[in-house]
Image (cartoon, grey):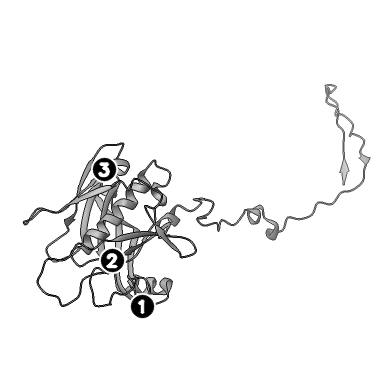
Amino acid sequence: MATSSLELGHRPSGHLAPPPDYETTEAVELSRLSPATSSTNSLPEYTTLYNIENGDSASSSSTSVFYPTKQLQIQAPGFALIRLPLPPQPDPIYVFNVAATGELDDAEANDPTQAALCTTTYRFGPGKPPKIRFVGDGSQNGQTEEIELSCKGVLTRSTIMRTHLGTFEWRYSSRAERRSAKASVGEDIDCLLILDQVMKVAIAGGKQEESRRKVGQFVRSDGLRTQGSRRSSAGNGGRLMLDLREWLDRKNEAIEMEILAVTMAIMGGASGGP
């Protein structure tokens, strides 16, 4: 390959400038770019999903996947299927934290005062749903809050509640959800209740549609219900699993959500539910 050096100057009028002298230099061959070496192949592959331990949210859709961050064991003797029509005895209901090793410890063992976190009020008559009231450390900014636990409809046992944490609904599971829970628990499921967070999402045309995200489930099986209780008995405890990732970074809200879910599960047990 040859290169040239050209000095710019005025041309004499009427005469063409003589051709410049070309100096031979070392030839350099340029390699042809191959399509296989395109720069687009050097881009990284984005395959990182949500990392629970590091709290990485590289994928926004991963937060919709149910991942229990808190597990509680509810222990209750339950009610026999056939019993005399007498007022039930006030049996104590215990709630235990479930450690990563599977061991149980009292959820309130570290509180020497054993102060109440919430109270429940049952009212007689139609159109009078029971109420939950946060008190003490369980209340929002030290203020009491009353939450009504209402039935969603006449032909359903689903219950719904509207709180400052959002709107939530307890419902019975589908067959697909029962199969998934059976695979994770490793045994047949006697009862599976799902706790959904219900939200309104804006869509085209200025309308809104309902969106749901699973934040909890209550599982009852031979290995998870209260020892000594039978499969046919009602309200015999089980394992409560909660996904509290949305509220972990907010002051006291994770604790409030935990109290709310436990209270709803126990209130359902009073009528033969969990």
Mark 3 to mark 1 CA distance (whole Å): 38 Å
Give the class, few, some or many, for how many residues have Cα within 10 Å of label 3's Cα (few <14, many ≥20). Answer: some
- Picture quarter with the C terminus: bottom left
Q: Where does the image place residue 173, in percent across and percent down from the top left?
A: 29, 68
Front residue (pair 24, 46):
46
Mark 2 to mark 3 CA distance (whole Å): 24 Å
Q: Which residue is mark 3?
A: 135
Give the amino acid type for the residue marked by disc 1 in the picture.
Asp
Front residue (pair 250, 230):
230
> Badges 2 and 3: C-beta atoms under 8 Å apart?
no
Q: Which residue is mark 1?
A: 188
Q: Earlier in the sequence, mark 3 or mark 1?
A: 3
Q: Is residue 65 visible?
A: no
Q: Which mark is residue 76?
A: 2
Q: Which mark is residue 268?
A: none
Q: Earlier in the sequence, mark 1 or mark 2?
A: 2
Residue under the point 84% across and 23% down? 9
Q: Where does the image place residue 2, in percent across and percent down from the top left?
A: 88, 43
Q: Where does the image place residue 237, in percent across and percent down from the top left?
A: 30, 67
Give the class, few, some or many, for how many residues have Cα within 10 Å of label 2's Cα (few <14, many ≥20). Answer: many
SS at badge 1: loop
Give the amino acid type for the residue marked by disc 2 in the picture.
Ala
Residue under the point 56% across and 56% down? 46
Query: Foreground mark, 3 or 1?
Result: 3
Q: Could you tell whether 107 is left or right of 88 in the image?
A: right
**Residue 81 in the image: above or below residue 31:** below
Q: Is residue 239 visible?
A: yes
Give the amino acid type for the residue marked by disc 3 in the picture.
Val
Query: Foreground mark, 1 or 2?
Result: 2
